[in-house]
Image: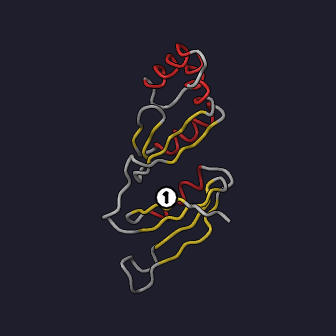
C-alpha cells in the first residue's frame, strides 16, 4: 500500500482538475468523488474531495475554499523520455496557465509542474565540466525544454 499520497487543496476546482489531469496522463483514473450534501461549506452536490491516479501514482484533491492556494515551493515533476512526451505534457498542462523557465509551468489551477527529459541529469552532470556548463546555459534560455538543443550544447 502506498504510504505517501500527494494532497492538493483547491478552492472549488478539484473535480475539474482531476478530470483534466486524468485525460492527460496514461494509466490514470478517478477512483472516487465525495460530494457535499445539504450541510457543509460547499454547494450541495459539488465535489468535496476526489481521489485519483496519474500513471499509477495516487493523488487526493480537496475543495477547501479560497484561502488555500498553490505556491512555487512545491511542484509535480514529470520525467519524459522523448521530445514528443515533453511537447504533450507541456502543451496540455500549460494551456490557460503560465509557461515558466527551464521546463517549469503553472497549470490553469495554479499547480506548478516541471516537464523534464530523463537525460537532463546526465547532461548537467557530465564528466566534462565545460559540457555540463553549456547544457546548463542552454537550459537557462529555454521555457519548454528541447532535448536536441540540450544535447547539442
Q: Position of residue 42 (x, y in %)?
A: 38, 76
Describe residue 127's horizontal placement relative to residue 17 as left or right: right
Quadrant of the image containing the C terminus: top right
Q: Position of residue 76 (x, y in %)?
A: 51, 48
Q: Residue at x 42, y 45 (%)?
A: 106
**Looking at the picture, does residue 30 appear above or below residue 36?**
above
Quadrant of the image containing the N terminus: bottom right
Residue 70 sits in quarter: bottom left
Q: How many marks?
A: 1
Seen from the viewer's position, the closer of residues 108 and 147 is 147
Q: Position of residue 7 (x, y in %)?
A: 49, 62
Helix, strand or loop at mark 1: helix
Q: Residue at x 55, y 54 (%)?
A: 21
Residue 140 sits in quarter: top left
Describe residue 112's horizontal placement relative to residue 57 as left or right: left
**Looking at the picture, does residue 143 appear above or below residue 90?**
above
Residue 79 sits in quarter: top right
Q: Residue at x 65, y 52 (%)?
A: 55
Q: Position of residue 123 (x, y in %)?
A: 59, 24
Crowd band around label 1 with a 10 angstrom C-alpha radius: few (<14), some (14–19), many (20+): some
Q: How is the image coloured?
A: secondary structure
Q: Residue at x 39, y 51 (%)?
A: 110
Q: Looking at this rendering, what residue extends furthest in the bottom direction?
A: 38
**Looking at the picture, does residue 26 appear above or below residue 49?**
above
Describe residue 45's horizontal placement relative to residue 153 as left or right: left
Q: Looking at this rendering, what residue extends furthest in the left direction?
A: 67
Say which residue label 1 marks: 17
Amino acid at each position: 500500500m502506498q504510504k505517501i499520497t500527494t494532497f492538493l487543496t483547491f478552492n472549488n476546482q478539484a473535480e475539474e482538475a482531476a478530470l483534466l489531469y486524468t485525460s492527460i496522463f496514461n494509466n490514470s483514473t478517478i477512483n472516487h468523488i465525495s460530494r457535499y450534501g445539504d450541510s457543509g461549506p460547499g454547494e450541495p452536490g459539488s465535489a468535496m474531495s476526489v481521489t485519483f491516479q496519474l500513471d499509477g501514482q495516487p493523488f487526493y484533491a480537496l475543495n477547501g475554499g479560497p484561502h488555500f492556494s498553490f505556491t512555487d515551493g512545491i511542484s509535480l515533476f514529470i520525467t519524459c523520455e522523448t521530445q514528443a512526451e515533453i511537447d504533450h505534457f507541456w502543451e496540455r498542462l500549460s494551456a490557460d496557465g503560465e509557461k515558466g523557465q527551464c521546463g517549469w509551468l503553472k497549470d490553469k489551477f495554479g499547480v506548478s509542474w516541471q516537464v523534464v527529459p530523463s537525460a537532463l541529469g546526465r547532461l548537467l552532470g557530465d564528466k566534462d565540466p565545460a559540457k555540463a556548463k553549456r547544457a546548463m546555459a542552454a537550459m537557462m534560455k529555454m521555457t519548454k525544454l528541447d532535448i536536441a538543443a540540450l544535447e547539442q550544447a
